Image (cartoon, rainbow, N blue to C red):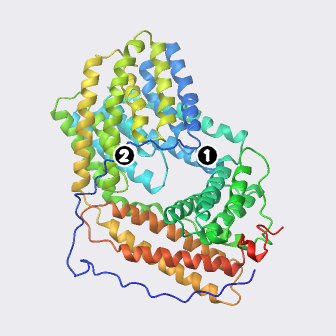
Amino acid sequence: MSSATPQRPRPQPRPEPRGGQHGRRRRQRPGRRLPIAGVLRLGRPSDIWFKPALSVIAAVAPPNLILLALGRLDLAMYTMAGSLCALYAHNRPYAARARVLAWVVLGMTAGLAVALLAASLTTDAVALVTVGALLAAAQKALCDATRLGPPANVVLTFITSAALFIPQTLGQVPGHLGLALAAGAWAWLIGMAPGLLRPHGPERRATAHALNAAAAHAATDGTGDGHARTRAAAAAAVHAAWQTLLSARATDTRRALERLVVRAEIALAAPADTDPKRLRDWARDLRGTGPVPHPGDLVDDDELLGVDAELATGRPPLWLRLGPLAPIAARTALGCALAGYASLALGVGRPYWALVTAASLYQANITLTWSRGVQRVVGNLVGVLAFAALVPLAHLTQAALVLICLALNFGAEALISRNYWLGSVCVTPMALLITEFAQVQDSGRLITERLVDTLVGAVVGFVAAVAVTNRRAGDRLGHALTAVERAREQAARLVAEPRPAPGALESARRGLAAALVDLRATADAASGEWWQRALPAERVVSAEQSGHRTLAATVRRQGLLLDRDASTGAEDVRR
């Protein structure tokens, strides 16, 4: 296929002054920014919902059953700290999963150690709530900076906050931490076990998702109804697939999958010249453990030189990634502390429930935080009703109590991917029943305290989110815009060169694609934030449009299109 000439650069709209169109400092008004419709709508379950659901059962059941046989269910809180680590990293390749799970176990144990030491040194509830709020803020910032993924900081904060209010002595701390580490080691084995049967499963799933998302965009020809939405979804899926592959070991299978992701990336850049059926066929062939399909139109591996270049660059240091998260961390610390203090002032005996409720709210912006608050309250209210129905059965025997908690663990992970509130319906009775591992509690008091703490945590936590502004969201959007414009200029310059260096054009194309994904994510986050200057919406749209046009030009320059135009007589795939 012949190379296409680069398009003539189009003039970019001039950025608005800092204060808006007329130089005034304008603030976005929050009035119509709180969604109600759709917050509780159920979505499709995750493709791998059963993996965390089965893993948590396999990780929690043996320690709990052993403690049940020994008559020491009062120690289950410490083993669960390690067992719940099995919930993490299910979307990562096994080489990366081994590292991530190890860090999760160590991080969980470190947070538990701080909580147990605090509990052994003081019984002052205000001091303990303060420690819990600081721990919650640190866990939130670290999970977001490392992009740990679900369930992120919520499980860590649940364990450490509850541990703060368990009577403790310094002499007991080492033994309790040893139980957590032992259960964490077992959870690590559970998380790694599926790799024995399907060693490249996560990479294959990520690649298949990218192909299907690119096919959905190609079906619109890049101009049909919903093309902007499908383009954003496809770009995010392709970017996620690259992140997954780049964290996997270098093998022939990974190289073959990289070629397929390149095809998805090309379809994103030039949807009108792509056959969506071929992409879907490749995605279907990635199921199971069969051979990876090979696109027959690739002549050599020059286009993968850009992958090698990205592998050599590395990620920014952790402290640089933590900087932009300071407002979110401040919100978490303030909201959790105030929620705990308010719970104490109301005489609730378990203020950590209010603290955890507040910690679970904080998302990328205030609008998403509001949505999570609604979901949390609704899920907890329905979950309290579920507890009232289950508690008579749980009081029959301790074995029944353990089995019901295991079933609720499974239900929570099976349902939470459809909507957070639906998973909370199982999490709430499970958290209430766990308090009965040591001794039977007054069910009426448990229900009352949980309802009060849920409402206090949600209201106080959201108020703290509104009070702590995130002015950096607009600055980050400006940086993302600059990054896209620079990446576009570099790609356009290489397109214009008669003979660009091997891999240079591919590397520039992939750099531009990643910058566009980051721009869309940053714009979405900033648009849901309050109390900031007007966002340059027109400049964002213009940057995205020109960026995707340049991506198409690089694809045509490389001659990598899967042409489906019947009038040209070209085949869908050259073999």
Q: Position of residue 547 (x, y in %)?
A: 52, 76
Kind of residue at disc 1? Ala
Q: Residues within 10 Å of mark 1 (few under 14, many from 20)?
A: some
Q: Quadrant of residue 550?
A: bottom right
Residue matched to label 2: 39
Residue in the image at 76% along x and 67% along y: 572
Asked whether the viewer can see residue 135, the reply is: no
Taking depth in this image into account, of 80 and 419 the one nearest to the observer is 419
On screen, 227 above or below 148? below
In this view, which residue lies farthest toward the right? 575
In this view, which residue lies farthest toward the front? 567
Element at label 1: helix
Residue in the image at 35% along x and 52% along y: 368
Q: Residues within 10 Å of mark 2 (few under 14, many from 20)?
A: some
Residue matched to label 1: 98
388 with respect to 195 (left or right): left
Q: CA distance from mark 1 to mark 2?
A: 35 Å
Kind of residue at disc 2? Val
Q: Quadrant of residue 86?
A: top right
On screen, 549 above or below 439? below
In this view, which residue lies farthest toward the left? 345
Q: Quadrant of the N terminus?
A: bottom right
